[in-house]
């Protein structure tokens, strides 16, 4: 199942057709996606009973109309150095435990956006993002996937100057400028993917591929991350977990490369789709 938002309203998606969940359910489900995420097993059951006739009420749409799969999440977690080649390109030892930071929720944006570049050195980081469904506290690793509603594409855009300014560096502000957390185009339930733990991800700048890997290369899997984070923080419906980026970021190149006005960043994950950001000065 594929789900997302149009004008902030929860929709199911097939191809380029969106079905409004509130309208299709006769008002049983609120238009706000959090109402479904809080009762995720029940919502999945309802969606699974939809017929071809129900989908006759769907409407075609262009990707540019989609919003983030979860607008305004309450918590946005992110993971540093979660791919071996990315840790190695930075000269870091592999972490023994997940390195968790946060992106502030106001940075979350939809899949096709214009992003105004702040002064500094803005870098790209394609990531698989997990969307929390029912969530929970102290979730055992073997039950971690039960807490996840879907997977989506994300970019952890980062202004490296601010990120590296302190001693030690601090991440969150530098990764939370407006538009620095684009997600989409939809979220896909894990059972609708060929292998939820092994997805190809890639990003390109003006058509040049700059990152390419598979999520099976992560040091800590989604199951690991859900168990680790929820051991401390209850995961809430609609929370996002940015799971880390592979090698190929701009600040580790020789010479370093950063995003410039007029450039387009395209990020894609097989089985989910792609997001596009155009950068303004």
Image (tube, grey):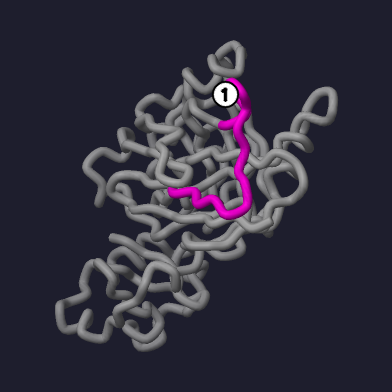
Which span of residues is magenta-colored? 250-266
Residue 168 placement (x, y as % from top left): 81, 23
Residue 147 placement (x, y as % from top left): 44, 48
- Residue 59 drawn in magenta: no
Instruction: Give the side of residue 238 with respect to residue 3, left or right.
Output: right
| Most common secondary structure along the magenta stretch | loop
Residue beneath label 1, please? 253
Mark 1 burial class by Cα count in 10 Å: few <14, some 14-19, many 20+? few
Residue drawn at (48%, 24%), measured in percent from left and top? 83
Quadrant of res 20: bottom left
Q: Is residue 112 above or below residue 27?
A: above
Dot 1 lies on which element? loop
Quarter holding the C terminus is bottom right
Q: Is residue 245 above or below residue 71?
A: above
Q: How many marks?
A: 1
Quadrant of res 222: top left
Q: Is residue 227 above or below residue 39?
A: above
Residue 115 placement (x, y as % from top left): 62, 58
Residue 178 placement (x, y as % from top left): 68, 58
């Amino acid at each position: 199942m594929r789900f997302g938002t149009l004008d902030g309203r929860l929709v199911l998606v097939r191809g380029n057709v969106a079905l409004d969940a509130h309208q299709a359910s006769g008002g049983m489900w609120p238009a706000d996606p959090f109402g479904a995420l809080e009762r995720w097993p029940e919502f999945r059951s309802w969606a699974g009973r939809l017929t071809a006739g129900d989908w006759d009420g769907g409407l075609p749409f262009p990707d540019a109309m989609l919003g983030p799969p979860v607008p305004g999440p309450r918590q946005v977690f992110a993971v540093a150095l979660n791919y071996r080649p990315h840790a190695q390109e930075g000269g870091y030892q592999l972490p023994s435990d997940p390195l968790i930071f946060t992106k502030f929720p106001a940075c979350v944006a939809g899949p096709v956006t214009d992003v105004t570049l702040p002064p500094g050195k803005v870098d790209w980081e394609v990531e698989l993002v997990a969307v929390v469904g029912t969530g929970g506290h102290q979730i055992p690793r073997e039950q971690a996937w039960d807490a996840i509603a879907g997977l989506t594409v994300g970019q952890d855009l980062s202004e490296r100057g601010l990120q590296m300014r302190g001693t030690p560096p601090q991440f969150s502000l530098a990764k939370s400028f407006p538009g620095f957390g684009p997600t989409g185009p939809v979220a896909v339930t894990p059972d609708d993917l060929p292998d939820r733990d092994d997805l190809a991800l890639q990003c390109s700048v003006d058509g040049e591929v700059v990152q390419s890997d598979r999520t099976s290369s992560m040091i800590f899997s989604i199951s690991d991350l859900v168990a680790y984070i929820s051991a401390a923080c209850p995961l809430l419906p609609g929370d996002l977990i940015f799971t880390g980026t592979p090698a190929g970021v701009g600040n580790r190149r020789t010479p370093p490369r950063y995003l410039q006005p007029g450039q387009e960043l395209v990020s894609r994950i097989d089985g989910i789709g792609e997001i596009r950001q155009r950068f303004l000065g």
